[in-house]
Amino acid sequence: MNQIRRALVTGATGFVGSHLVRRLVAEGWHVECVVRPRSERSMLPVQAICREHDGSTCGLTDLVSGASPHVVFHLASMFVSEHLPEQVEPLIRSNILFGAQLLEAMSSAGVDALVNTGTVWQHYGTADYDPVNLYAATKQAFEAIAWFYSRARCLRVLTLELSDTYGPDDRRSKLFSLLRKAASTGDRLAMSGGEQLIDLVYVDDVVDALLVAASSVLLQPSGYMRSFGVLSGRPIALRALVNEYLSVTGQSIEIDWGGRPYRHREVMVPPNCTPSLEDWQPSVGLAEGIRRMERLPR
Ligand SMILES: NC(=O)c1ccc[n+]([C@@H]2O[C@H](COP(=O)([O-])OP(=O)(O)OC[C@H]3O[C@@H](n4cnc5c(N)ncnc54)[C@H](OP(=O)(O)O)[C@@H]3O)[C@@H](O)[C@H]2O)c1
């Protein structure tokens, strides 16, 4: 009989995390999730066990030890594109301190396989390392710490660098939620010039990539640490993307293109400088993904 696979997931209550947990449960994994006392858990299946982290390293070690997972999926993160001074501490707490506690907890509990999530924004202008923003710098800082744990404590770490993702049940305030809101209110939407290319991967394809990554990291020798890109390979200009969304959904919105400046260090072309994840291809095209996201019939 096959042994039941066990996963521990951080960021399980987030967009990608909740889709991942539902898939793991559907595929028969035993899943435990590290949540915060105030995390909204209603999107998680009842089979997934939520464990509250008390904020301490010892507390996290107990959670990791109790879950005894074959693999840890680390998706917890705070995202902010242009930070305010008061966001420095929460960014570092969520993206560096919590991650470092997790690595220490894994090492203490004898759990050694980690699938981590990074961002292509660690590579502004396709540099090996040039963070687009403080968020991307914190993701890199976590990897620098993970490097210690892989060298000195023999952890196996595979990072997937994500670009943009989309799909149903996305509570983040991103492009599609803005378009949806403008379509329902009839408000005119001010946007940048719209020339920037966006690389979007449908959330089911991202989950596929996470599962491929888990299978891969479990086959690696101790001390392994590598990063792979998860991109659709079909970047599309923001203006064309908005047109595609409106055409698939049959909505119309008044858009003031150029009504907002581009962001400081706007990414005009998604960096594609990290090797692609082997044994993974996106399978959901943009029009189909938009239909699925909006739950429209074919
Ligand atoms: N989605 C994308 O397009 C994209 C692109 C590039 C990289 N990524 C990376 O992919 C991962 C998943 O992204 P996502 O979009 O699914 O994230 P998300 O929807 O913003 O969710 C973030 C998750 O992290 C948890 N979290 C934040 N701070 C925490 C802390 N201090 N302790 C414990 N949990 C904490 C949140 O828990 P609460 O429910 O308690 O708030 C939530 O479950 C992240 O690492 C992100 O950086 C995503």
Image: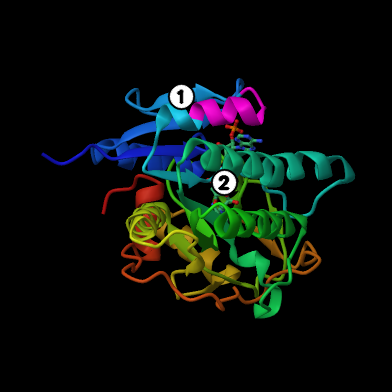
Q: Is residue 247 left or right of residue 216?
A: right
- Residue drawn at the location 46% of the way across and 30% of the way down: 65
Task: Kindly state the secondary structure of the residue where label 2 is placed.
Answer: helix
Three-letter code for the amino acid on which mark 2 is drawn: Ser
> x, y percentage for residue 5?
28, 40
* Distance Cα–Cα, label 1 vs label 2: 28 Å
Tell me if residue 10 comes above or below residue 248 in the rendering.
above
Q: Residue furthest left?
A: 1
> x, y percentage for residue 264?
81, 66
Judged by depth in the image, the label closer to the viewer, 1 or 2, is 1
Q: Is residue 39 left or right of residue 219?
A: right
Task: Kindly state the secondary structure of the residue where label 1 is placed.
Answer: strand
User: Does the magenta stretch mainly form a helix, a strand or a loop?
Assistant: helix
- Residue drawn at the location 81% of the way across and 40% of the way down: 89
Q: Which mark is residue 177?
A: 2
**Quadrant containing ligand 1:** top right
Q: Per the image, is 292 magenta?
A: no
Badge 1 crowding class, 10 Å Cα cut-off, few under 14, some 14 to 19, many 20 or more, is many
- Residue drawn at the location 76% of the way across and 60% of the way down: 133
- Judge by depth and name the residue closer to the eye, 29 or 83: 29
Residue behind mark 1: 50
Q: Is residue 272 left or right of residue 195?
A: left
Image: magenta residue range: 54-63
Three-letter code for the amino acid on which mark 1 is drawn: Cys
